[in-house]
Image (tube, rainbow, N blue to C red):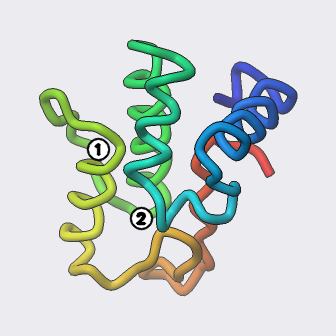
Amino acid sequence: MLALGEIVREAIYQRIQVTHQVKREEIPEKLETFHKALQGLLGAGARVIEKLIAKNLYSQLDLNFTEGADWTIVEYFDHAKKAKGGGWSMEKDENDRGETLEIELLGGG
């Protein structure tokens, strides 16, 4: 999403909030709804965005990204959580080096 720019990211967040009643900060708790909202907005393009989000997450968690066949963002996040022993939240946590992670679903601030 970084390539699309801040205006597009904010438009997507706004649209998801209006159409699916999910605020930006609620996305980690409502990941399935976020997935469905992206699908509704972007169609097949949602897979590409979800994969980019997952790659970013895996990188922040110091995990090697492995593409899952037909995985959605929900499966990627579940896999990452299991790979890290379930010891992190999707909002904020610390990595193994003690650095604070802020999982930004669509990139940017």
Disc 1, disc 2: CB below 8 Å?
no
Number of residues whose C-alpha sits closer than 10 Å to that of mark 2, classed few (under 14), some (14–19) or many (20 or more): many
Q: What residue is drawn where x is 51% and y is 63%?
A: 28
> Which residue is more in the foreground, 36 or 46?
36
Helix, strand or loop under label 2: loop
Residue 50 percent coordinates (x, y): 43, 34
Number of residues whose C-alpha sits closer than 10 Å to that of mark 1, classed few (under 14), some (14–19) or many (20 or more): some
**Residue lying farthest to the right in this orientation:** 7
Helix, strand or loop under label 1: loop
> Which residue is more in the foreground, 68 or 73?
73
The residue under label 2 is: 61
- Side of 31 where 72 appears, left or right: left
The residue under label 1 is: 65
Residue 51 percent coordinates (x, y): 39, 33
> Which residue is more in the foreground, 76 or 22?
22
**Residue lying farthest to the top in this orientation:** 44
Residue 64 percent coordinates (x, y): 28, 50
For the residue marked with disc 2, what is the amino acid? Answer: Leu
Q: What residue is drawn where x is 51% and y is 35%?
A: 37
- In which quadrant of the rendered view does residue 80 lie? bottom left
Residue 1 percent coordinates (x, y): 64, 29
Q: Which mark is residue 15?
A: none
Question: Is residue 18 placed above or below 12 in the rendered structure?
Answer: below
For the residue marked with disc 1, what is the amino acid? Answer: Phe
